[in-house]
C-alpha cells in the first residue's frame, strides 16, 4: 500500500530541529516524508509546519496541500492581523499550552486548536 505524503517545514537546528529529527523515523514508517529545503513534495496530501511562516502560507504551493497542520507556541498577548489570517488557513493548530490557545481564540483564530504539552527529554 502506498504511503500518504507528508511535507515538513521546520527549522532543522536547535531544539525544534532535534524534535523533528527524533520524529522522522516514526513519520517515515507511516508517511512518504519530504522536507522543505531538502526535497520537494511529490504529492500534496499533508503539510506539517513548525511555527507560522507567512512566506510559506503565501506561497502558491500552500493551497495545493489537502491538509495543513501547524505546531505553534504563543508567547505574548496579541497577534498581528495578518498572522491571524494565516493561522486561519490551517486545518489544525497544535500548541503546547492552554494560555496560547486562549490567546489565539481571543485574537480571532477560528481553526481547530489542540493543546499538546511539549515536555521533551
Image: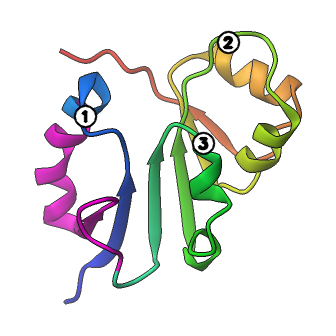
Asked whether 20 or 116 is in front, the reply is: 20
Disc 2 vs disc 1: which is toward the camera? 1
* Crowd tier of the residue under label 1, counting other residues whose Cα lies within 10 Å: few below 14, some 14–19, many 20 or above: some
Residue at (34, 84) in percent of width and height: 42
Real-space CA distance between mark 3 and mark 1, rounded to the nearest whole angstrom = 19 Å
The picture places residue 13, in percent across and down from the top left corner, at 24, 31
SS under mark 2: helix
* Crowd tier of the residue under label 2, counting other residues whose Cα lies within 10 Å: few below 14, some 14–19, many 20 or above: some
Q: Magenta region: which residues? A: 19-41
The picture places residue 103, in percent across and down from the top left corner, at 77, 19
> Mark 3 vs mark 1: which is more N-terminal?
1
Please give the label number shown on residue 93. Answer: 3
Disc 3 vs disc 1: which is toward the camera? 1
Above or below: residue 25 compared with residue 95: below
> Is the residue under label 1 in contact with that under label 3 (CB below 8 Å)?
no
Residue position marked by numbered label 1 in the rendering: 17
Asked whether 1 or 111 is in front, the reply is: 111
> Mark 2 vs mark 1: which is more N-terminal?
1
> Mark 3 vs mark 2: which is more N-terminal?
3
SS under mark 1: helix
Asked whether 73 or 58 is in front, the reply is: 58
Question: Which residue extends farthest bottom?
Answer: 1
Amino acid at each position: 500500500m502506498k504511503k500518504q505524503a507528508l511535507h515538513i517545514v521546520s527549522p532543522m537546528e536547535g531544539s525544534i530541529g532535534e524534535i523533528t529529527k527524533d520524529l522522522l523515523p516514526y513519520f517515515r514508517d507511516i508517511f512518504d516524508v519530504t522536507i522543505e529545503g531538502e526535497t520537494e513534495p511529490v504529492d500534496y496530501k499533508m503539510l506539517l509546519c513548525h511555527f507560522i511562516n507567512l512566506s510559506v502560507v503565501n506561497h502558491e504551493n500552500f493551497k495545493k496541500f489537502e491538509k495543513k497542520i501547524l505546531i505553534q507556541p504563543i508567547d505574548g498577548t496579541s497577534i498581528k492581523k495578518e498572522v491571524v489570517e494565516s493561522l486561519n488557513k490551517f486545518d489544525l493548530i497544535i500548541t503546547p499550552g492552554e494560555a496560547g490557545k486562549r490567546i489565539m481564540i481571543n485574537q480571532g483564530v477560528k481553526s481547530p486548536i489542540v493543546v499538546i504539552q511539549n515536555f521533551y527529554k
